[in-house]
Amino acid sequence: MMTESVNTAPEVSLLHPSGGPPAVPLVAIVGPTASGKSTLGVWLAEQLNGEIVVCDSTQVYRGFDIGTSKPTAEERRRVPHHLIDILEPSEVFTAGEYRERAIGVLNDLRQRKLLPVLTAGTGLYLRALLEGLAELPVRSEVLRAQLRARAERNKPGYLHRVLARMDPTAAARIAAGDMPKLIRAIEICVLTGKPITEVHKGVRARLEGFRPVKIGLMPPRTALYERIERRTIEMMDRGWLAEVRTLIRRGIPATTKPFSFIGYGDLRSHLEAKSDLPHCVTAIQQATRRYAKRQITWFRKEQGVHWLEGFGDDRGIMRRALQHLREELGEGYESANHAGAGR
RNA sequence: GGACGGGUGGGUGAGUGGCUAAAACCAGCAGACUGUAAAUCUGCCGCUCCUUGCGGGCUACGGAGGUUCGAAUCCUCCCCCGUCCA
């Protein structure tokens, strides 16, 4: 049942740069929402003796299940899933925290000689994990509140001008209307006393000890959009509205982070303000399409991805993904339980 | 048969003589993004040519004519749609 570990056959090229343990493979499945990452991930994990590590900023929240398209109970029974349902709705989560938690999970899987299969919808989180983040101070809510207040008191473009004084390079790269990024940039400058451009030049703490093998799902655009539209209807049929009603009844405020996820705010206002439900559904479909497009833009830049032009639940795509992984992973990753399945 | 209202670029829709290839919004496309990223933001969006420029040409506001230096905008006729009256 236990795989023959690659650890037993150390190769110089796989050695940890600092002389630590040799690198073991890690599978990362990237792709836009509704492309079938979960389905493919579960199946691959079964074939290759792995477990799922979710890389998604929304599925970490408990209680927000249908709208975030979490893996089904059945899928979770078949293969253990990590970093899902780990937070209360009131908790704030960041890319940096994701990285820390994920490293913990990865080390655990390595010890147990299991293959990590990341299903990644949140590009920033994947990058934070794999490439690391620069040594930066964490958010300062006090400073942020001050900045926001001052921005309101002044003319539009105020924060952009402030940043331009502290770090012209950063100001040139951030649009005057992009509040979150302006605030973070100023925050870093204030807290470190250095321009954010300088700070970003510092070394990023790359993930060590793992060798990422990336698979990308890129279905044809029109088919993806159609599936998004259908999936939204299915979510409604499966009781999304009831889920939101329950969350409201539990007293979870609308200002809470997960209520900013696609659909949750809309459905909440439908329930509380009686906004038109069909329009609501249309708006959700639209927002999801836009989101998928942003994901595609992000992942296109991702290095070293083996792209497959279809959905992750398509037999042909599944087989091609498995075949590619067999070539990349080398010996020792065939699951005894499932070897030969899916043929 | 009569009275109004209306027909604008993929959609909604503003525009009542030149500043209009035509506001705005949506859809679409492309992009940025190192700590709330399902967030936030930017560009393009009739066709075409090149020396890619606040560049040239062509086509466009239901149809056909007309007025005018110049028309989506004014006039005439026709066609369609909506509402109301017979």
Image (cartoon, rainbow, N blue to C red):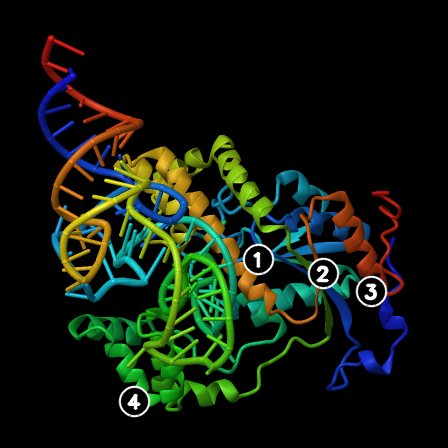
Q: From the viewer's perspective, is residue B84 above or below residue A203?
A: above
Q: Amino acid at mark 1?
A: Gly
Which residue is located at x 82 percent, y 65 percent? Answer: A328
Marks 2 and 1 on same chain = yes
**Direction from residue A33 to residue A303 in the image, left or right:** right
Alpha carbon of mark 3 to alpha carbon of mark 2: how far? Answer: 12 Å
Q: Amino acid at mark 2?
A: Pro
Alpha carbon of mark 2 to alpha carbon of mark 1: how far? Answer: 16 Å
Q: x, y (%) of residue A189?
A: 37, 86
Sequence order check, earlier mark of 3 and 1:
1
For the C terminus of chain A, which image quadrant? top right
Residue receiving disc 2: A116
Classify mark 2: residues with Cα within 10 Å, few (<14), some (14-19) or many (20+): many
Sequence order check, earlier mark of 2 and 4:
2
Q: Secondary structure at mark 2?
A: strand
Q: Which mark is residue A121?
A: 1
Classify mark 3: residues with Cα within 10 Å, few (<14), some (14-19) or many (20+): many
User: Could you tell me which chain the residue with mark 4 belongs to?
Assistant: A
Q: x, y (%) of residue B27?
A: 43, 49
User: Could you tell me which chain the residue with mark 3 belongs to?
Assistant: A
